[in-house]
Image (cartoon, helix red, strand yellow):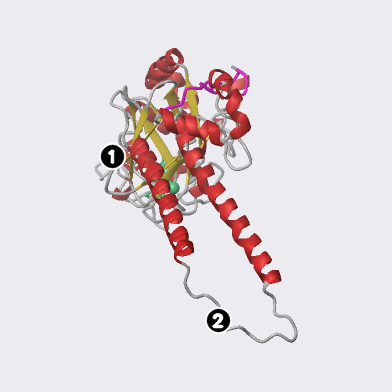
Amino acid sequence: MSMTLQTLTHIASGAQAASAFAQAAAGPEPANFWQPVAASTNAAAVDFMWDFINWICYFFFALVVALMVYFVIKYRHRAGTAFRTDYPHHNTPLELTWSILPTILVIAIFWFGFKGYLDVTTAPKNSFEIQVQAQKWAWNFKYPNGAQSDDLYVPANRPVRLVMRSTDVLHSLYIPDFRVKKDVVPGRYSTLWFQCDYPTGAPSEKGPKVDGHHLFCTEYCGTGHSNMNRKVYVLAEADFTQWLSDQSQWLDKIADDELYFKAGPKLFARCQQCHSLDGSAGIGPSWKGIVERVKAYPNVGEGKQYPTFEDYIRTSILVPGEYVVPGYANAMPTFKGQLNDRGIDAVIGFMKHLDEFDPKTGKYLKAAAK
Ligand code: HEC
Ligand SMILES: [Cu+2]
């Protein structure tokens, strides 16, 4: 955003102006009554525009109400006086004022608004690009090295561009702290960019609690809409590079015989909103007893469409519409490109050893013993 806008913002925010430079180094502009913390480089321009329009509203509300009350009292009908009909019906200076002044204000709003819109629409050339796929009801974030995540991880001090698409219905990606929001439309790409200069750190099982920025889907997209509330974690350059390489290799780093209990529960987290482990039916069938159930299907078995249980599960994950379980809608999204063969192996192993996992949470029960 241009220097003028930022300067104006700080002037507009009055008392905060003095401390603005001190804050710039320490952390983002904190939340106030109207706005959450201003954590991106675009935020100042958006907040300035918001404050500007807000103050215009306060000013004219006060002016109109004050004049109205004043005139109502001053020109009230008094007993014994006749109604006047000789009131003025034209006043050129007054009419010019109330036409020209609002026009200037509206042009100013358009000018700042359009400029801000162009700035948030046009990503800088050196942006770090992340592919976003929205589906009922999850986000999938895919990084240039093949790493994937459910929460969004971004590098600090660098513009980040999201290239977004939807596999099913209309979704909308919204990160209030960054002041960005964009519809994610099936059948076409939409893009978004932001830059955040304040690392939050990544959450870890043992480390201190880390608070990421909220990320929402703001287009009601059905039953699991609220499952699309995720977090954005901003990592310092070196941490981010490390995270990326860990993330792309995590499945390869697990030994084969540990795959089903180390990777299984983690992968199940992506299936959990539709599949249970305790026998209760959800959007999809429960996985309890799935091995026996599937073996009884007419198209699973030697010489049939799916020679083995594993073939059937693999196809169900990659091409869910091939065999739709009776009694259920064809509502399962494909995980093609999201689960590789090793991931699918982990899920299959997980299904075969369900008795070793907590039927509510999917946690590995023997973990403590090991
Ligand atoms: C949005 C809901 C949803 C999500 C998320 C989902 N599924 Fe499904 N799944 C379904 C539905 C609905 C069916 C039944 C219809 C069909 O067979 O396609 C199903 C069926 C299946 C079947 C066949 C089950 C059987 O009993 O024959 C398998 C295997 C499966 N899903 C695996 C997965 C895996 C693995 C994941 C996570 C990586 C997952 N699903 C995530 C909705 C979902
Ligand atoms: Cu959604």
**From which residue to which does the magenta span run?**
195-209
* Amino acid found under the numbered disc labelled 2: Asp
Gap between marks 2 and 1, in whole Å?
97 Å
Q: Residue 102: x percent and y percent?
A: 45, 55
Circle 1: residue type: Pro
Does label 1 point to a residue whose CB lies under 8 Å from ligand 1? no
Which quarter of the picture shows residue 95? Answer: bottom left
Q: Which residue is mark 2?
A: 86
Label 2–label 1 contact, CB within 8 A:
no
What x and y, as percent, mark residue 130? 35, 30
325 vs 126, nearest the viewer:
126
Magenta span: predominant SS is loop
| Quarter the C terminus occupies | top right
Q: Is residue 98 left or right of residue 308?
A: right
The image quadrant where one finds ligand 1 is top left
Confirm whether the magenta stretch covers residue 202. Answer: yes
Q: Nearer the viewer, residue 19 or 83?
A: 83
Locate residue 256 relative to residue 224 in the image: left or right: left
Q: Earlier in the sequence, mark 2 or mark 1?
A: 2
Quadrant assignment, res 18: top right
Residue 288 appears in the figure:
no
Quickly name the residue at label 1.
307
Q: Secondary structure at mark 2?
A: loop
Please state which of the two labelled residues, at mark 2 or mark 1, is closer to the viewer. 2
- In terms of depth relative to the viewer, which is nearer, 199 or 118? 118
